[in-house]
Image: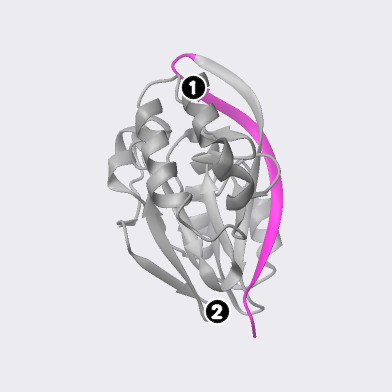
Amino acid sequence: MTARIDHLVTSGTFALDGGEWDVDNNVWIVGDDTEAIVIDAAHDAAAIEAALGGRTLRAIVCTHAHNDHIDAAPALAEATGAPILLHPDDLPLWQQTHPDRAPDGALTDGQELTVAGTTLTVLHTPGHAPGGVCLYAPGLATVFTGDTLFQGGPGATGRSFSSFPTIIDSIRDRLLTLPGDTTVRTGHGDPTTIGAEAPQLDDWIKRGH
């Protein structure tokens, strides 16, 4: 059976540097009727488990370790037995939310994850967070960008552990080189495409977006 992408939105709080914001997060599930992976276990482990519908969960993949993307990961792992995977550069952020529970495995640049016959390649894209990653699935013509790239610009870089020049380099070198018809499925908000975002790069740099 061909892999498909399921999507749900969960709501909660993003907290960093002493501030808190109400946020809606995209949770992406890639798989078929028997197995799946979850990209960003945000806020509501029970809702994510329900969306899995009894499928075997192969992994919980974290695009980065801001609390709103990982807060439900340990509970989902406990409920399903799936390992939590995170790029090690984001361990300091992870430990702010889950000091007593380490991830189960490390994501590395170029690593390939396979589920339901579909391969997702890990692209290390620091900037929004040091260990930020995107997951490119050419067979689905999709890249899952977490908070690295959104419709209309890069992810925020005004808080600790972030860097605007670094995120611009990541987007230019790792994402805008993908085919223009690649759908960009983001950590928050609506999808876009690489082709729609690429022409805006110079404007983002000028604005320091």
Amino acid type, mark 2:
Ala
| Vertical relation: 111 (above or below) 48 | below
Residue at the image point whose x is 57% and y is 36% from the top: 200
Q: Looking at the rendered structure, which numbered label has been put on residue 70?
A: none
Answer yes or no: is residue 69 visible: yes
Q: CA distance from mark 2 to mark 1?
A: 42 Å
- The residue segment tinted magenta is 1-18
* Viewer-closest of 58 and 132: 132
Q: Is residue 59 left or right of residue 95?
A: right
Residue at the image point whose x is 68% and y is 48% from the top: 191
Residue at the image point whose x is 56% and y is 28% from the top: 14
| Vertical relation: 117 (above or below) 74 | below
| Vertical relation: 154 (above or below) 173 | above
Residue named by callout 2: 116
Q: Quadrant of the N terminus?
A: bottom right
The percent coordinates of residue 53 (x first, y second) are: 70, 68
**Element marked by disc 2:** loop
The percent coordinates of residue 34 (x first, y second) are: 62, 79
- From the image, give the main secondary structure of the stretch colored magenta: strand
Q: Looking at the rendered structure, which numbered label has been put on residue 206?
A: 1
**Element marked by disc 1:** helix
Q: Quadrant of residue 121 in the image?
A: bottom left
